[in-house]
Image (spheres, grey):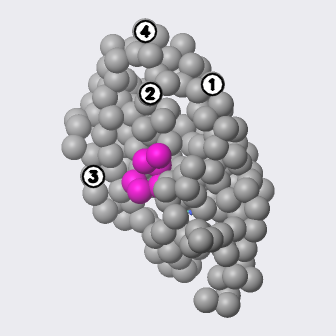
Amino acid sequence: MTPAYQKYLKEVLISQEALQTRIAELGAQISHDYADSPDLLLLCILKGGVMFLTDLSRHITLPHEIDFMAASSYGMGKRASSGSVRIEMDVRANIAGRDVLVIEDIIDSGHTLRFVMDTLIARKPRSLRLCTLLDKASRREVEIDVDYVGFEIENKFVFGYGLDLDERFRNLPFIGVVDEDALKSD
Ligand code: IMP
Ligand code: MG
């Protein structure tokens, strides 16, 4: 039987192997950079960042905590965000004085992350950095400093490995490009 995602998949953009190789590299880099940190907190932005968080965490050789936060943005339809962002679920941990590394699936316009980073910095962490699996840098509308990037990608709508297509297919082990024609014919 053909899997349900197949009709929406134009091409595999980043294979499972390529993802895992790059995530292992990022984990090694982060382990090196935070070697002197007493108190690393990986703060995953839900829902899209969750697969990346769990794989990345297993490649970080330092003791660390994980926590979660959810944000959403409104105003320009569900495929693009605008300046109006809301925290849907706040982080439980007190981040004051801690080394916080935000884990995100993808940065597009940057509005979501700009709001999240501004919210977090006001709580006085010891350090605050950003790690994103995917970066659509050409789409940026607001400035964001990204400390760790898995892959820079072109302006194509992608899904899989945490990223959804109308809430489905987050479980795919690879990143695929959406076939826009198949979506229109739904
Ligand atoms: P931004 O605020 O425009 O940077 O939007 C970031 C959010 O939009 C991400 O966290 C995703 O939830 C969503 N997003 C942006 N591009 C894509 C994509 O290609 N596939 C799936 N979700 C996306
Ligand atoms: Mg996201």
Q: Residue furthest front?
A: 1
Marked residue nearer the N-terminal end (4 or 2): 4
Q: Nearer the viewer, mark 1 or mark 3?
A: 1
For residue 58, which numbered disc appears in the image?
Answer: 2
Image: magenta residue range: 46-51
Q: Nearer the viewer, mark 2 or mark 3?
A: 2
Where residue 31 sits: x, y (%)?
A: 50, 17
Label 3 belongs to which residue? Answer: 90
- Residue located at (40% from left, 54% from top): 46
**Quick check: is 49 in the magenta stretch?**
yes
Marked residue nearer the N-terminal end (1 or 3): 1
Dot 2 lies on which element? loop
| CA neighbours of label 3 inside 10 A, class few (<14), some (14 to 19), many (20+) | few
- Residue located at (65% from left, 31% from top): 21
Marked residue nearer the N-terminal end (2 or 3): 2
Label 1 belongs to which residue? Answer: 25
Label 4 belongs to which residue? Answer: 36
**Quick check: is 66 in the magenta stretch?**
no
* Residue 148 visible: no
Label 4 CB less than 8 angstroms from ligand 2: no
